[in-house]
Image (spheres, rainbow, N blue to C red):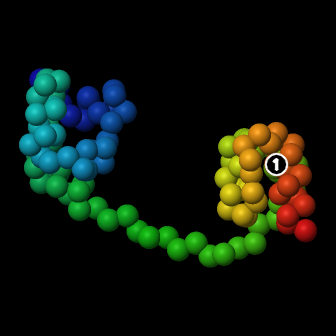
Amino acid sequence: MIEWNDFAKRRKLNLEDFKEWSYEDYTQWCVSRYVTPVSEESFSAVKTIVEPIVETASVPITIDEKRLKKMKKSAIIELCEVRGIDLDGHETKANLISMILNNSE
């Protein structure tokens, strides 16, 4: 059987990928792939890790045309939705940019 660390490095896996699973499900998954699972203590330690909550302060962001043109259209659409700009779904990237610039003035 292959050690979990070697298998995980090769497959770019992390124990955090399995934090929603039970230890029994995880071990069955490992055994079916001929991998030695980590200990139950190690597995449960990953499940108890609490990610810190980061509060984001409301910071005004300056938006200029040059920055908007570098963004992907999907990101610009999200920005329009955040700013409350009504979209019909047929806007071009240039139209979206002009709508944002006109709205921010």
Task: Identify the residue at horizontal 13%, vertical 40% (top origin).
Answer: 25
Residue 55 % position (x, y): 53, 74
SS class, disc 1: helix
Residue located 12% across and 54% down the image: 41
75 shown above or below 57 = above
Q: Is residue 56 above or below residue 47?
A: below
Q: Is residue 12 left or right of residue 62?
A: left
Residue 9 in the image: above or below residue 38: above
Between residue 33 and residue 60, name the one nearer to us: 60
The image quadrant where one finds the C terminus is bottom right
Q: Can see residue 9?
A: yes
Pick the quarter of the image with the N terminus.
top left
Quarter of the image for residue 32 reads top left
Give percent across and percent down for residue 18. Answer: 25, 44
Which class describes the residues within 10 Å of circle 1: few (<14), some (14-19), or many (20+)?
Answer: many
Residue 104 is situated, as x and y percent measured from the top left of the image, at: 85, 66
- Which residue ends up furthest to the front in the rendered image? 88
Location of residue 9 (image quadrant) = top left
Kind of residue sitting beneath label 1: Leu
**Residue closest to the eye, 52 or 21:** 21
Drawn side of residue 68 relative to residue 75, left or right? right
Q: Residue at x 68, y 57 (%)?
A: 81
Q: Is residue 36 visible?
A: no
Count of numbered badges drawn on the protein = 1
Q: Which residue is mark 1?
A: 96
Residue at horizontal 30 percent and vertical 48 percent from the top: 16
